Image (cartoon, rainbow, N blue to C red):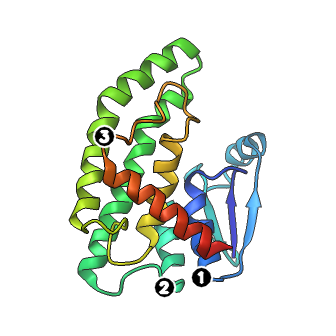
Amino acid sequence: LKLIYFPIGGRAAPIRNAFKIGKIEFEDSHVSFAEFGEAKAAGAYNFGALPVLYIGDEQITQSNAILTWVGRQANLYPTDIKQALYVDEVLSAIEDAYGLIGPTIREQDPEKRLQMRKELAEGKLKSWLAGVSKLAARNGDNGYFVGNSGNVADLKANAVLTWISGGILDGIPKTILDEFPNLVKARDTSSKWIEEATS
């Protein structure tokens, strides 16, 4: 098993953590942005995007599909179909954050990027957080999105919630989650679980 991604967390972080928590051996292969550009131009990746997982010679794409596949083997994905539905809903909802923030990352003008992020933080990103907060609230107040312990939904949510509240994205305040205490709890609960489970 070979996972290919950039040398950052991003969409690969939940997958790497699922592998580690499940004690499943895999090759964590990193490519630079320049190497990715060359490989993409040569048609190396089915959708011109990362991460991809190689199972032998077979290339698997789509980060959520890879995450749930690893999660099933690592006992991090529910066997109950209703619980599985909730998990899939969280994974899809969390993925939407990349679509919201992506255009601001591609914006080259620093001033314009800051303005875009300010509008995002006060508008669509806040609305998105409100929706994610409702998904967390459905599961009560235990800090997990589905059930009574961590699973792939928490791995995915943790990657994005820590990213947007970590001060890495200039123009998006580190306090952005403060309005949603249950998301602060979800972030912190999953961070503690991941640290303990992967050490």
User: Label 3, label 1: how many angstroms apart (C-alpha)?
Assistant: 34 Å
**Residue 146 picture location, percent across and down:** 32, 72
The kind of residue tagged 1 is Gly
Q: Earlier in the sequence, mark 2 or mark 1?
A: 1
The kind of residue tagged 2 is Asn
Asked if marks 2 and 1 touch (Cβ < 8 Å), the reply is yes
Residue 62 visible in the displayed image: no
In the rendered image, which residue does mark 3 sit on?
Answer: 179
User: Label 3, label 2: how many angstroms apart (C-alpha)?
Assistant: 33 Å
Pick the front one: 175 or 68: 175
Q: Earlier in the sequence, mark 3 or mark 1?
A: 1
**Residue 118 picture location, percent across and down:** 41, 22
Which residue does the image show at 61% across and 67% down from the upper left?
Answer: 195
Tell me: 23 left or right of 31. Answer: left
Which residue does the image show at 54% across and 65% down from the upper left?
Answer: 192
Pick the front one: 99 or 140: 140
In the rendered image, which residue does mark 1 sit on?
Answer: 22
Looking at the image, residue 85 lies above or below residue 98: below
Residue lying furthest top in this view? 111
Q: Secondary structure at mark 2?
A: loop
Looking at the image, residue 144 lies above or below residue 109: below
Which marked residue is nearer to the observer: mark 3 or mark 2?
Answer: 3
The kind of residue tagged 3 is Glu
Residue 120 visible in the displayed image: yes
Which marked residue is nearer to the observer: mark 3 or mark 1?
Answer: 3
Pick the front one: 101 or 177: 177
In the rendered image, which residue does mark 2 sit on?
Answer: 75
